[in-house]
Amino acid sequence: MKKKVALITGISGQDGSYLAELLLKKNYVVHGVIRKSSSFNTGRIDHIYVDPHNKTNFYLHYGDLTDSNSVYNIINNIKPDEIYNLGAQSHVGVSFDNPEYTAEVSGIGTLRILEAIRFLKIKKIKFYQASTSELFGETYNKNIFNENSKFHPKSPYGVAKLYSFWITSVYRESYGIFASNGILFNHESPRRGETFVTRKITRFLTRKILGSKDILYLGNLNAKRDWGHAADYVEMQWRILQQKKPEDFVVATGNAYSVKQFIETCAKVLKIKIIWQGKGINERAYFINNNKKELLIKVDKRYFRPNEVHYLKGDARKAFKKLRFKPKFNFKDLVEDMIKHDLELARSEL
Ligand code: NAP
Ligand code: GDD
């Protein structure tokens, strides 16, 4: 049987690397788009690339979502069955500093792919758009979001992704392209970028218990997120494209925890005692070790955003039913997985 061919933008990112592994296991030929960078940016996929089993089913191409020609040429050369658009400037905080670039990559980048599909008239292509819970932004009356909830993005990233969400829907309705949005809530893993809050915390705490003298500076400790595991969520990305008809799905766990609760769960897993003192900008966490109190975490307003999404919790009942979504990792499993990995990493750095 002819193997299915998938193209992944953002293959060097957290989700891209898990999705590539999943599709290879499912016997796909996987092509990925990587950016030219002055330093190595393929750390998450090097193990796939060097594996001799993947010699004839894993290919990387230089391209960029800001470059229409590269997008068009890659799609034209590969003629994939499925395209997963995971590429993005994905950091909400950074999007306030680079709003125009964020719009180009995370917004218009999606249009560039859809336009290539339309021009090339490759009917078989199924398109997945990495949409996000940042589209919701504001909690109105209800504290849980589903596919029918109102959008109110609160960052340049959220607005860029809102464009992508709607242009995906418009190309589906106007041109009959199989194009679906996965509206994914936060998902983390040992491969999470180190500037996102969960990984920033697990990297810091695991170094700390091995003797680091550093202090961690964080922003809003009270923000709540619905945190799942990326390995579970890429399975849903694939399932969304295996549906008979294209449609949009919320993917979430249905539980929300604060940044502070994330820290406390890490402390439990690491069996360390921390105490909190002070309020607001003066809030601090201390590490209690042999009855000695050592400063661990300080709030730093440099990490506050000009506008904040305070609370995100998803209602994924549609995905539970139609995609048979059954996450393997709960919140504690996720924390344990990240801590275990980062503890080993910290030991290897000693
Ligand atoms: P990530 O780790 O930040 O990966 C982003 C990927 O996009 C990287 O491979 C990056 O390449 C690539 N990229 C950045 N700029 C690009 C450009 N101009 N052209 C082509 N590729 C570019 O993000 P992630 O956590 O895996 O998330 C995957 C997707 O899901 C993103 O679109 C994100 O916005 C969305 N999403 C994520 C979450 C989440 O909680 N993780 C939730 C909802 C939606 P480099 O490696 O070269 O930087
Ligand atoms: N990054 C970061 N760094 N966030 C911090 C910090 C800090 O030092 N201190 C507190 N926070 C708070 C942020 O203000 C936010 O409320 C929360 O922690 C989570 O921040 P991030 O981990 O940066 O993730 P995000 O929720 O803003 O965005 C992620 O999830 C979205 C889905 O809801 C990204 O993966 C987006 O790409 C994704 O769309």
Image: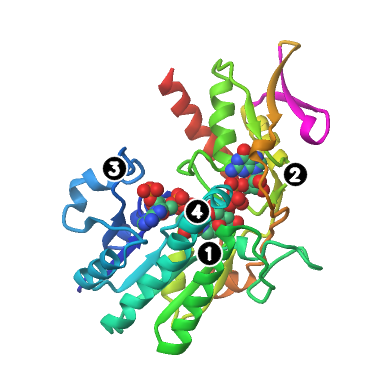
For the C terminus, the quadrant is top left
Q: Is mark 2 on a helix, strand or loop?
A: loop
* Colour theme: rainbow
Q: Which of 320 and 175 is in front in this view?
A: 175
Q: Residues within 10 Å of mark 4 (few under 14, many from 20)?
A: some
Q: Which residues lie in the magenta part? A: 271-289
The answer to whether residue 82 is left or right of residue 134 is left
Q: Where is residue 243 in the image (x, y as percent from the top left)?
A: 45, 78
Q: Residues within 10 Å of mark 2 (few under 14, many from 20)?
A: some
Q: Distance between the residues labelled 3 and 1?
A: 32 Å
Q: Position of residue 77 (x, y in %)?
A: 19, 69
Residue that mark 2 sits on: 222
Nearer the viewer's eye, disc 3 or disc 1?
A: 1
**Visible residue check, residue 111:** yes
In which quarter of the view is residue 137 placed? bottom right
Q: Distance between the residues labelled 4 and 2?
A: 21 Å
In which quarter of the view is residue 10 placed? bottom left
